[in-house]
Image (spheres, rainbow, N blue to C red):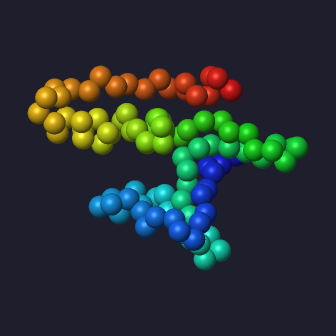
């Protein structure tokens, strides 16, 4: 069991102004740029991939990544009309549906 990597010759250079996050997520494999997806998966005995869910609370909605924890919430409060963000996460939510 482990994280699913994305490997490509056109992968991004990393997160803007977030060197520590880039170093943790991106690496080189076979001369190509790669990154960990944050999804936990394993090969089955039948050669299929079983996905167990996310390692973080990130969700994707219409191809937009949403980070309910951390900087996603703090970025929303930069707008004067937003006083607070009511987001919360449910631990193990994805895993309970598999």
Task: Look at the picture and state if 22 lies above or below 49.
Answer: below
- Residue at x-position 34% and y-position 25%: 87
Please say whether residue 68 is visible from this viewpoint: yes
Residue 45's x, y, as percent? 87, 44
From the viewer's perspective, is 33 left or right of 52? left
- Residue at x-position 43% and y-position 42%: 65
- Residue at x-position 64% and y-position 23%: 97
Task: Look at the picture and state if 72 lies above or below 18.
Answer: above
Q: Nearer the viewer, residue 62 or 23?
A: 62
Which residue of the protein is positioned furthest toward the left in this rendering? 80
Residue 32: quadrant of the picture? bottom right
Residue 21's x, y, as percent? 40, 56
- Residue at x-position 29% and y-position 35%: 73
Task: Look at the picture and state if 58 lies above or below 94.
Answer: below
Residue 54: quadrant of the picture? top right
Q: Nearer the viewer, residue 73 or 79?
A: 79
Which residue of the protein is positioned furthest toward the front in this rendering? 62
Which residue of the protein is positioned furthest toward the right in this rendering? 46
Please say whether residue 20 is visible from this viewpoint: no
From the viewer's perspective, is 95 left or right of 80? right
From the viewer's perspective, is 61 left or right of 51? left
Task: Look at the picture and state if 22 lies above or below 64.
Answer: below
Residue 34's x, y, as percent? 56, 64
Residue 35's x, y, as percent? 54, 59
Quarter in which the C terminus is drawn: top right
């Amino acid at each position: 069991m482990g994280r699913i990597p994305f490997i490509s010759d056109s992968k991004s250079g990393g997160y803007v102004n977030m060197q520590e996050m880039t170093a943790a997520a991106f690496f080189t494999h076979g001369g190509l740029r790669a990154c960990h997806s944050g999804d936990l998966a394993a090969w089955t005995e039948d050669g299929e991939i079983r996905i167990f869910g996310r390692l973080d609370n990130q969700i994707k909605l219409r191809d937009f990544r949403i980070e309910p924890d951390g900087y996603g919430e703090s970025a929303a409060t930069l707008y004067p009309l937003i006083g607070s963000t009511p987001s919360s996460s449910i631990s193990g939510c994805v895993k309970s549906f598999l």
